Amino acid sequence: MHVSIISSGTTPKVERCTSCCSLFHCPLCLKFKPAKRSKLHSHLEAHKKGGILFKDKVICRCGLNCREQGHYHCPVCSKTVLRRPDMTKHLEACQGAMTAASPEQTSPTTPKDTAAVSSLVSYLQDLSSSSQESSTAAPVSTLLQATVSTSQDLTASEQENRGSRLSPKKDKCPHCKYTFYKKNMVKHIQRKHSGKPKDITVKDHLMSVCVDATNGISAVQKTRHGFSVPIHVQKKTWGHVHKIECELQECRQYHLMAVRSGMTSRHCDHIRSLDYCTEMATEEVLKEEVLSELVALKFFVSLQESQKHFCFSIHEPSVNHYSRLRRVMVSYNREDNTWHCSCAKPRRSCVHKNLSKWHLFQTNRDIFKTEAASTPPEKHQGTGYPPSDDTLERLVKYLYSNKKIPADLPDYLMKPKALTDHLTELHPIETVCTNCPGSVHLQKSTRITQKAKLISMNGVLENVSTYYRCCPQCRMVYRYQEWKDSLHNFDDHTILTLELCLYLRHNLQNNVSVSKVINSLESLRKVKFPARDTILHAYCHFEALTSHNYSYSCVCCGFFPPVVVMDLHKKGVFNLPVSDMKEPSENFTGDVDIEKFWDSVQLEMIARGFFPSRAKNIFAVNPSFEHWSPWIGKDTRKSDLVLNTEFAKLPATKSSPEAEVSMMSEDRLVDELLKQKVSTVRKLCKACNLDSKGSRMDLVVRLREEMKTRHSYDKIFQKIWGASGGWSVILCPHGVVYSLKFNLRAESPRDFTDLLLSWKHLPNVSVYDFARGLATHANLRLPASLTFKPHEGRLAASSQDNITAAQQHKLSISLPWLTEKLQSPEKDGHPLTGSSDHYVLYDKFHEANTRDPQEVLRRINLVPELQGSLNSQVAEQLFSSMQKNNYYLNNMAPSTHIFFMRNIIHLRNNNTNAKLVEQQLKRGREFHHSQDITLNELGQAVLGKY
């Protein structure tokens, strides 16, 4: 008999736990938190009260791991049923079936048969009366006659009656909310809930159509079920050059991970499905001669007999991130009347869409239609009871060292709780001083307040008491700070639940500020929450105590990416009087201790709970040239000493090449001036004591002349650009941020040079919007070794032949070590490529901006290995996402701003890495889980062996 089935008047036997605690666990459910015997008995009475009375037993609802959801166990047939009404019906049917099947089927006149008949009659009468049928005698008498005549007829008739009355037409899936016919339920569970990936077979594979037989290119379904835009896959195993490749980035990354793991023959489902490809696409030649130069042939691909979607495979002469196999897939949704091409944004025209429309109009004029449109949508800085400064400093450092919160919290701590279930008396758990030698017992708890507020998702619990203890010898103070109770103590007056802290974290990842979240909760719960600034600082306190590793590395590129993209987010700024900053000491060389600086920032966040304002916080971190550091992952940087030479951005004398570089920041500021309204430019002229009359260009020319003095430059910069110089980032092509620098002054190549020179291994290819300036500055910084070489970071020597060939798109510079490491690595070679070459290239947006002809040798499209795989706009995509946070980040104090930014970027990196691993495993269809993934010595993900 199952443990959830108990005799009436009794309770399940309970025993004290000896494995994880010394309390009592509930034997019927896993949700109950271990408690004292008296509390457990009350809990078990609630189980009995909600149970089903059956004969002399009570069937309690079972919450054990028998099934995913709560359920009931049948005492007759040992089946499990989810819903209470269904269980009641099941018991009636089960009891009747057992009664009917118990007698031996011998002669109809035996006493046993008579007992069986009378039992069945009473059972059927009960069933008839409970269902309130209008006529009950007829079915009973009919069945009675059938029973007396033959036992076989009885069984068939009784089963027919049960089937018509007790079996519902549809059943609810035990794993999800959907209902299905019984005959389809098994198939549904196999498809959706089995957890086992399907293998590619002749009967079960992704549909595919060959669109280019010469090059072995096919269009393959992206997913198994439903409509999805097909993708291009190449499988050419004949001729001089063999090539097997899927255009999906995650499939390519999966194959690379499999190769690193020693599984070179692993391929994604798309490539494996080509073994069963038997169809060829129909060829349609466009009749207009005008467009024959752009596209000679286009293939119409129909993977499904669907009139809702049409797919077109368009030949694309160049290799891009959307056409890695020189083909682009365009789809048309007839119902929504929408076109989609991977080279263009929605509702934006492109040559591929136009060619597809032209083809569709030529072949199916009746469905040709026009297009439609749509739209998009946007503050906050604590308090406490402090002891003396010296004791307070020890307390803050004790919290930072000994009260860390795990980065991955157990699930049970995040489960919703009623406000009344939380503790209302918060005592420190320390009983012995951790500083004094020996066992010095702490003094009795002293109450700080009895009016503290506990803030949760469900509202505010008031009149919470907080306490502290003091050491009688060293006077060290200890307070309550225990995350295991699902609580986070900020300032002894404001306590947050961990559920709320994590909810705030997820909202910040979705560009929703803390104040907006609290406004929504306040409106929903109709309860007054504490000040928004208090909750903001409490959240900062929570993140400062969380054990984030801030690794800042990609699972695909490892700790040392061979290719990086660099850019500046100039709109991510904080208020800072740049001109008032003190000059650094004469012996300062630009070396900053990165760990020491960021520890001081986190200590400030923790100490805010003990000071009424930031101005009085003795741990406050203010911007300075000597104590201001970027963030670079521990495994990526050379050491804890990193470079920040912003104090040298405007040296007294410069060589002519470096003078050109320094002018870059002024040119950018002039560009920003030209974007301002005329009224804004006039106000700036007045502020600089300049003539404010004339055209916009006259005013800008005057301001440019005035900018030659540092004081005027800073004044104009603060008005136009904000106060600080934005933040510089270095990313890998997958969008994972490796380095983050918060500029105090206007950005220049010096900022990125500082970051790169702090790395253990320089990337082989750096993509930057001012490549010439970066190469010039870096090589001037280290003239003996030359940071960027050969050819000053260009792809080829600056000969007239090379320049002409590059301008005519006839020059190709192959860098094979980007895809396969050199067998004999060069001296000081990169650990992933083996090459010691270091190039600086322009991104796609800015490659045409330079006037120097030789800079054409810095274009990405000259390198075949980068043409189709490198998305040089990952930085712009990051900024597009992050600028949605500017409305609250730009109003923060400098230290809060950089703390928030580092944390948000770290969590974003984690999400990006998790998606990369998940996509690769999904494309590989392997029996691996994310837990099986490990990092090799270079920080790259590898599969666990099985």
Image (cartoon, grey):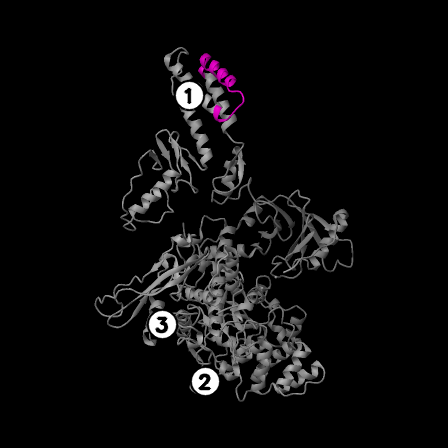
Q: Say which label, 1 or 2, has the lower sequence index.
A: 1
Q: Is residue 331 above or below residue 738?
A: above
Q: Nearer the viewer, mark 1 or mark 3?
A: 3
Quadrant assignment for the N terminus: top left
The location of residue 230, given as percent across then percent down, is 62, 50
- Using residue 804 as the reference point, say whether residue 630 is left or right of it: left
**How far is the residue under mark 2 from the one under mark 3?**
33 Å
Query: Marks 1 and 3, Cα distance to the nearest angstrom?
Result: 79 Å
Residue located beneath label 1 in the image: 100
Q: Answer yes or no: is residue 296 visible.
A: no
Please say whether residue 755 is one of the residues in the magenta stretch: no
Disc 2 residue type? Pro
Label 1, secondary structure: give it: helix
Task: Compare residues 109 and 859 and report the one nearer the observer.
Answer: 109
Range of the magenta residues? 129-151
Residue 426 in view (yes/no) = yes
Residue kind at label 1, given as amino acid type: Ala
Q: Secondary structure at mark 3?
A: loop
Vertical placement of residue 645 versus 483, above or below: below
Q: Percent position (x, y) of residue 209?
A: 63, 47
Magenta-drawn stretch, dominant element (helix, strand or loop): helix
Three-letter code, disc 3:
Pro
Per the rendering, the mark at residue 386 is 3
Residue designated by label 2: 584
Disc 2 element: loop
The answer to whether the residue labelled 2 contacts the one labelled 3, judged by CB atoms less than 8 Å apart, is no
Q: Position of residue 726 (x, y in %)?
A: 54, 74
Seen at 66% across and 75% down, the residue is 675
The residue most toward the bottom is: 653
Sequence-wise first label, 1 or 3: 1
Assess whether residue 137 is covered by the magenta stretch.
yes
Q: Within 10 Å of the Cα at label 1, are there few (<14), some (14-19), or many (20+) other Cα atoms?
A: many
